[in-house]
Image (cartoon, rainbow, N blue to C red):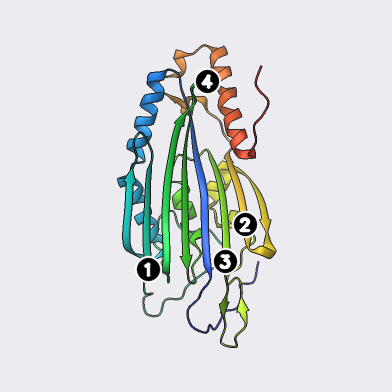
């Protein structure tokens, strides 16, 4: 059991900035040009600015934020962006903020202090013109000032998208001072982003950490363990493909996932 850091008696407001940024990738196979077009249309409908706004509003509920301003935009020919500015929400009388290293909710509410903070998402749907691979990417950032870590919203966000690959970065920046004038560069215990993931999520993904503890930088990569081809075919069924075709499509899809997970191009398939 890791001992929590002692509660700091601060001089003024907590000036630490905690930023969670990550990319979520959803991979599919669309056989024909028409299927690829329909896939882009489906993604634009499924993850348009209105639905993304609803997702980010729920994040505000989870981390206990008041919405100050919402800017949203659907793009032509594809993609969408939403940015929400938020401010602190007062804690109920007698409530204690709890910042232990454990998973946040999937979507129950957590009330806490926030100020000068923002949440944003940008989407990037695209289709490969040759092999039919279609990859949807969503970039999300939750940045807060104050006592709470945005990692509390992590489980909800991962399960709000069809997430085949997830890359996560968490950083605590700046410093805050205690009543004696000493600077503090972090105010909560963290060894790994993985410790904030629900067990259900950990069971579904293989994960790799790259952490720089002395700089308060934490990085985790995630890729689904199970591969079921039927879940990746868009606009068709498995019966539309021969066994050999299914094998080729599976290899293309898994290669796409591995390239994204490892961050490098792999040798061409024979």
Give the residue number, with chain letter if any, for mark 4.
131
Q: Please, what secondary structure does the residue beneath circle 1 have?
A: strand
Q: CA distance from mark 3 to mark 2?
A: 12 Å
Identity of the residue drawn at 48% across and 83% down? 12
Q: Position of residue 251 (x, y in %)?
A: 60, 23
Residue most extreme to the bottom: 180
Nearer the observer: mark 3 or 2; the answer is 3
Give the residue number, with chain letter if any, for mark 1.
87
Q: Is residue 184 above or below residue 43?
A: below
Q: CA distance from mark 4 to mark 2?
A: 35 Å
| Lateral position of residue 201 relative to residue 56, left or right | right
Identity of the residue drawn at 44% across and 13% down? 240
Quadrant that contains the C terminus: top right
Mark 3: few/some/many CA within 10 Å (<14, 14-19, 20+): some
CB atoms of marks 4 and 1 within 8 Å: no
Q: Position of residue 146 (x, y in %)?
A: 48, 71
């Amino acid at each position: 059991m890791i001992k929590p850091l002692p509660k700091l008696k601060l001089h003024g407001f907590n000036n630490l900035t905690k930023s969670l940024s990550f990319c979520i990738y959803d991979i599919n196979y669309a056989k024909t040009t028409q299927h690829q077009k329909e896939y882009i249309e489906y993604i634009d409908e499924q993850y348009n600015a209105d639905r993304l706004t609803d997702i980010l509003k729920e994040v505000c509920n989870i981390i206990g934020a008041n919405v100050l301003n919402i800017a949203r935009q659907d793009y032509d020919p594809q993609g969408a962006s939403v940015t929400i500015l938020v401010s602190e929400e007062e804690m109920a009388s007698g409530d204690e903020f709890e910042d232990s290293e454990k998973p946040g909710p999937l979507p129950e509410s957590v009330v806490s202090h926030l100020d000068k903070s923002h949440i944003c998402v940008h989407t990037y749907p695209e289709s490969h013109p040759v092999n039919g691979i279609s990859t949807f990417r969503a970039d999300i950032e939750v940045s807060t000032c104050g006592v709470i870590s945005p990692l509390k919203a992590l489980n909800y966000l991962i399960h709000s998208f069809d997430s085949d690959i997830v890359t996560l970065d968490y950083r605590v920046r700046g410093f805050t001072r205690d009543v004696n004038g000493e600077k503090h560069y972090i105010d909560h215990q963290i060894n790994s982003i993985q410790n904030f993931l629900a067990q259900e999520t950990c069971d579904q993904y293989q994960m790799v950490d790259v952490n720089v503890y002395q700089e308060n930088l934490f990085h985790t990569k995630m890729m689904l363990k199970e591969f079921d081809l039927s879940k990746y075919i868009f606009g068709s069924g498995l019966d539309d493909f021969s066994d050999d075709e299914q094998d080729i499509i599976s290899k293309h899809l898994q290669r796409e996932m591995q390239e994204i997970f490892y961050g490098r191009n792999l040798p061409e398939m024979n």
